[in-house]
Image (cartoon, grey):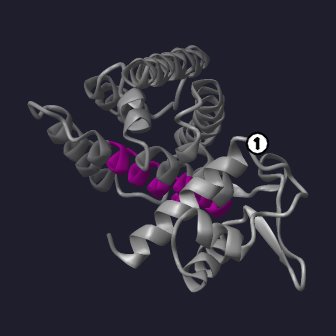
Amino acid sequence: MGAQTVVADVADELARRVAAGEYTPGDLMPSVRQVAEEFAMNRATAQLILGRLESHGFVEAHRGKGFTIRDVREEGGVEVYRRLFRLSLPRPEVAVEMFRDIVTMQRQIVMDALLAYTAAPHGVERAVLERSIDELETLARQLNPDLPAILAGELALVRTLLSALGHSMQRAVLNSIGEMILEVPTAVEAYYAVGPDLHVLMWRALAAVWDSDGGPSDAQVALFEDLFGMFHERVVAHFDEEVVGGAETATAATA
């Protein structure tokens, strides 16, 4: 195992302890010496690990005192949340709560972008959108669809619309949300719980609205909102089933 792998693995373990509340916010993190002794490594490597935790936002360095533990759930930014989500999988109740938050934020950004663009389609050539949707359909029709590739394609499509609308902040947040989901295979699988084909059908329906002269009717807008709501409930429910089932299997295996 390489030195970088050791640093990453031990940093993840210590971050997991912070995320799980095994270390109390405000308390001192184990010292360089203690980390080196626990994980059988030299102090230089232990120092690198604690430095990584600081750069990731899990601890704060205080000269002459060491590293104190941050309240990452209250004070952490998007990147901290991203790591917390990945590390939370062994605790299903926390993982599901975080995934619901992620999906809710993603749903709001995407829905707002689609409605804003549908109200006044502009800035993107129709052929570009059509080609992107065709690529999604090709991926979705494969015998074993590459779900991460489909998700990346959908995110790229939404980013195109956000760029056309001038919504740079929403685009940045969407990028982070996409990374959070793509890093966790169970989350990607859950995202397509209703099947990738239905995602393509949604994009086709939106493209038809963009082609129309009058824009969406109130009934169409309400329908899209209802579909998004039901879709995301299915996504969260599927994630819940997979994470809880995985945790129960792991517990049974170690019993």
- Looking at the rendered image, the quarter that the C terminus falls into is top left
Q: Secondary structure at mark 1?
A: loop
Residue indicated by mark 1: 21
Q: In the image, is 193 to the left or to the right of 216?
A: left
Q: Residue furthest left?
A: 143
Front-lying residue, 36 or 76: 36
**Local crowd size for mark 1, using a 10 Å CA cut-off: few (<14), some (14–19), many (≥20):** few
Q: In the image, is 210 to the left or to the right of 102?
A: left
Front-lying residue, 216 or 66: 66
Residue 32: within the magenta? no
In the image, residue 46 sits, relative to residue 187, either above or below, namely: below
Magenta part of the protein: which range? 151-176
- Looking at the rendered image, the quarter that the N terminus falls into is bottom left
Task: Give the residue at x 45% y 34%.
Answer: 213
Task: Give the residue at x 42% y 75%.
Answer: 4
Q: In the image, is 127 to the left or to the right of 103?
A: left
In the image, residue 250 sits, relative to residue 137, either above or below, namely: above
- Callout 1 amino acid: Gly
Please state the horizontal and vertical placement of residue 241, each as a whole percent of the image: 46, 16
Task: Give the residue at x 59% y 80%.
Answer: 48
Task: Give the residue at x 54% y 64%.
Answer: 39
Can residue 120 be seen here? The reply is no
Residue 212, image quadrant = top left
Please state the horizontal and vertical placement of residue 17, each as a whole percent of the image: 67, 48
Please state the horizontal and vertical placement of residue 91, each as a whole percent of the image: 59, 30
Can residue 33 be seen here? The reply is yes
Front-lying residue, 191 or 64: 64
Please state the horizontal and vertical placement of residue 35, each as a whole percent of the image: 64, 68
Residue 193, image quadrant = top left
Residue 162: within the magenta? yes
The rendered magenta stretch, by its main secondary structure, is classed as helix
